[in-house]
Each structure stands twice: as C-alpha cells, then as structure tokens.
Amino acid sequence: MLLLKDIKGQNNAVKSLTTAIAMGRVANGYLFSGASGVGKALTVRAFLSELYCVEKSGQGACLACSPCRRIWKNEHPDVVWVKPEETKSIKIEQIVTAKEKLHLKPYESERTACIIEEAHMMTREAANALLKVLEEPPGKAVLILVTNKRELLLPTVISRCVDVKFYELASDTVKSILMRETGADLRTADIIAALSGGSPGRAIEMFKSGFLERRQKVMNMLDEIVSSKYPHLNAWDSEKKETLIEDIELLVALLRDVVISKEGVPGKVIDRAFVGTPAHSYFSALSSDRIGKAVARLVEMKVLLEGNLNPKIAAQALAGELIG
C-alpha cells in the first residue's frame, strides 16, 4: 500500500489529485490514461484511500483503518469495480449495474465510486450508457476510467472527464522500483529497466516470468542462426505472440549495443553478456547502416504482430528479417 504522495514518477497526476482533495473539488469523472504498468492502478487505490480513510493525518491516508485496507483489497462496499468479461469487452449490462449501485445510498461513507478498468474495452452501447452517467452523476459519486488506449474511447466520454495523464518513467526510477520490489541485482535491473519501456509494472513482470532464462535462449538462437549455412531457414523457437514481441524488443536492444560498441562508447552498452558471442562478432562486422535496416525491419514486424500478423508467419520469418 502507498500514500498518494509516494507514487513515483507521476508528479503531475499526484499534484492534480492531491490539490482536488485539499480544495474539496473532487470531480465526478476522471480519466487515468497512459502506458501499462506506470502506476495508474496504484494511483487509483491511493486516491480512493485519501477519499475514504477515516483516520487521515497531515500526511494523508493512514493505510491501516478498515476502509483503507478494503480499498487495497477491492472489497470496499461503496466502490464498484468494472472490468472486461471473458468476451474481452465491457458490456452495457455491467455499466447499468454499476449505475444502479452508484445511485444507492453509500453503506458507510459520504460517496460511492466506480472504477472502470481497461475502459477502452467498452462496447459502444456501454460507452453511451456511461456517458449518461457522466452527464448526470449521482450525488458525490466518483467515476474513474483507466486505460492504456485513450484513443479508443468516445471523444464525448473523454470530454466529460478530468484528464489525468500518466507517463513512462525514467530508466533509473524503473530500476530502483524493480530492485525494491523483486530483489533483482543491479546488473539484471539495468537490463530489464532498459527494455521495460518506462513501465515498472512490465519490468517486474519480465523479472518474474523468467526474462533472464529467455534472454539466454535468444542469444543462443542468435549464435545458431549466424553459424548456420542457411540462416534464413531457421525458425524461431516460439510462435506465441507475446513472446515474439518481447524477443524482438530484446533483439533490437542487442543490435543497439552492437552499434554502440562500434561507435566506441562501450560504457553505454546495456547487456555486456552479449559482447564476445558469435552473434555479436557477426553483427559487429556489418556496417551501422545495415544494422539500422535490420532494426527497422524488426520494429516493423513488431508493429504488425501487435496488429493482425499471424505469429506462426512471424516465427518463420524472424531470422530472415534479422539477417536481411
């Protein structure tokens, strides 16, 4: 559990919310938007703790009273949590149910609240139903929409919310959070933080999901590919979309390290374990321009994978895109 003031790297969001509470001007609708894993979920709970805490001090919520503890467990009776169902969408029935609960008298506090996770997954009918709630909010009810795809929300929904933007964190901040939360050593934290895209949540997930083991497999595959008589014919060892995307991001980082070494600034190399491998030697012999083109092809493949590219096709083509 964290106090609102202790949320790292989101000073503008924290200041906006803290000021609203201090001045008694908490809005009926908020939109928390930004990349995944940068603190939106933590901020939701810290903000709600400030609103519902019954033992507040000058430092903020106590984080120990019953309302605070239940907020962090998603168990507070005056707070409704809405998220996509198994169909991967938020349906109108969910919004209607939430609306009904918001109109009820709070069980034990002054206000009700509704948190809509992955708000961009609302169907159009659900979004239109939510719009009516935002236009005529019941009493002191607070609605917080959380999304990493703001552009998919209806403009009319966005316009009726206080826009609270969340940003990617600096690599050093991600590294610090990762080491604190997982006990990762400095070298591991350096590598993962650099590949996390400024997302502590993603960095922690990478560490817990066996990133180091996967990284070694990727480097071993690279050695096999560059040593092969027909490197283009080597198929990648995974056809899982998420794994392929993460592997491509790692490959881009490794090629970046090669270019940095070639430019004579080895101190900026992220993954020193790659230096001296057959793959590193192979790519070091190429021009920076050729490596840059390989990176561009990999980035394009990642974008296609995030869209509709069949992962099986990507797995078959990845080695060829890498070698050129």
Image (tube, helix red, strand yellow):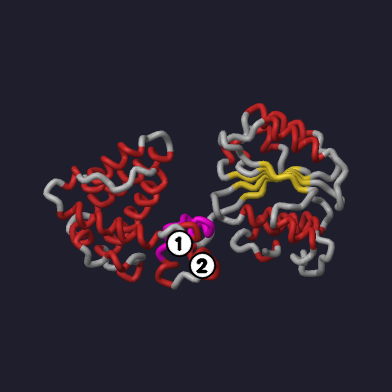
State the image coordinates of residue 243 (x, y, percent, origin top left).
39, 48
Amino acid residing under circle 1: Phe
Among the 4 quarters of the image, the one containing residue 250: bottom left
State the image coordinates of residue 213 (x, y, percent, origin top left).
36, 61
Question: Main SS type for the magenta part?
Answer: helix
Viewer-side residue, 11 vs 298: 298
Viewer-side residue, 322 vs 19: 322
The reply to whether discs 1 and 2 touch (Cβ–Cβ < 8 Å) is yes
Is residue 269 visible to the viewer in this orientation of the structure? Answer: yes
Residue that mark 1 sits on: 207
Which residue: 67% across, 44% down? 31
**Mark 1: which secondary structure?**
helix
The furthest residue to the top = 125
State the image coordinates of residue 308 (x, y, percent, origin top left).
41, 34
Residues shaded magenta: 191-203
Q: Is residue 201 magenta?
A: yes
Which residue: 18% across, 58% down? 282
Around disc 2, counting alpha carbons within 10 Å, would you say few (fewer than 14), some (14 to 19), or many (20 or more)? some
Say left or right for 151 vs 30: left
Viewer-side residue, 129 vs 293: 129
Q: Is residue 205 above or below residue 118?
A: below
**Mark 2: which secondary structure?**
helix
Which residue: 79% across, 64% down? 65
State the image coordinates of residue 37 (x, y, percent, origin top left).
55, 54
Q: Is residue 14 above or below residue 137?
A: below
Amino acid residing under circle 2: Thr
In whole angstroms, how far apart are the C-alphas of marks 1 and 2?
Answer: 8 Å
As drawn, the label of residue 137 is: none
Residue that mark 2 sits on: 182
